[in-house]
Image: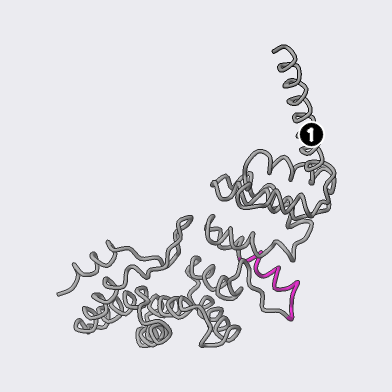
Amino acid sequence: MRLFFKSLKIILAVAFTAYSLFLGYQLLLAPKEQRFQRAGNIHMQGIGLSQAMLSVLNWQYPEYSDPYFERSVAYNKRGDYATGFHYLDQAVELQPQKHLGYRGYMKLRFLRDYKGALLDFDRLDSLTPDVADAPWGEDIDFLRGESHFGLKNYQKALAHFEQSVINQGKDWADVQTFVFQGLCNHELGKYEEAILSFQRALEQFENTCEAHYGLARTYLQVGDTTQAMVHLKKAKDNIAYKREDPYKEYLNEIYLQDINALDALMP
């Protein structure tokens, strides 16, 4: 029995030593790209080991921007924007062309810092004059239009949304581009143009509840209650297709209570 426990201790010691060496290799000696990929894995993102690996990479390769960026993502997802932007700002400083788009996107969609977002988008655009950038997968002029919409600069917003349609082509533009054009025109008192914009959205996707809701508001504004009620019902019927995200609220997001509130205004 004594021999058994002695052997077990040796096995456990060897296993622990092997694990420690493996962990040390992963933290300190593996190729930096390999360590970055492991640390950024979606299943490791934000846990202590991931942050430790990224911290070591920051220490060993202070000019390597990606670990700073990756560290920021986990904090931003948790809503710790102060810490997230501490690392994100360092990534932008090292490689602005690579990371400005994400920072602008975060400022727009999460912080509602519209002016800051525009500064980042405009700077990115100046660094890539021959490219139609797509920060975080969305057309840059769509995002700039949304930023101006947030600032209530509706005329400037319209110009960027129209440029976004040009960038992507009418058939490929985000359907929300036309919705925002309708919202801008509505705010500017251009109700006929607003109706046309919302109808363009429905031509692309007939279940766009934001467009139906926009039409209901606009038709009610011009006194066409029949069409207003038709589109309000369609907005309610298509609420399942609304624009939504579990992490954030969109500027043009609508809710069932908005539809019910408008319905209460119908004669």
Extreme residue toward the top, this view: 2
Q: Indicate left or right for 26 with 211 as reference.
A: right
Q: Inspect the magenta stretch and tell me whether residue 1 lies in it.
A: no
Q: Residue at x 84, y 49 (%)?
A: 61
Q: Indicate left or right for 68 with 258 as reference.
A: right
Vertical placement of residue 52 versus 94, above or below: above
**Residue located beneath label 1 in the image:** 18
34 or 58: which is nearer to us? 34
Kindly identify the amino acid type of the residue bearing the numbered disc 1: Ala
Q: Residue at x 74, y 20 (%)?
A: 9
Instruction: Residue 48: give x, y in percent of width and height.
Output: 65, 38
Extreme residue toward the left, this view: 267
Q: Indicate left or right for 259 with 160 as reference.
A: left
186 or 236: which is nearer to us? 236
> Could you tell me which quadrant the C terminus lies in?
bottom left
Q: How many marks?
A: 1
Q: Residue at x 57, y 80 (%)?
A: 164
**Callout 1 secondary element:** helix
> Could you tell me which quadrant the N terminus lies in?
top right
Vertical placement of residue 99 versus 174, above or below: above
- Residue 82 appears in view: yes
Instruction: Residue 55: give x, y in percent of width and height.
Output: 75, 42
**Residue 117, quarter of picture:** bottom right
Give the extent of the magenta segment.
118-130
97 or 8: which is nearer to us? 8
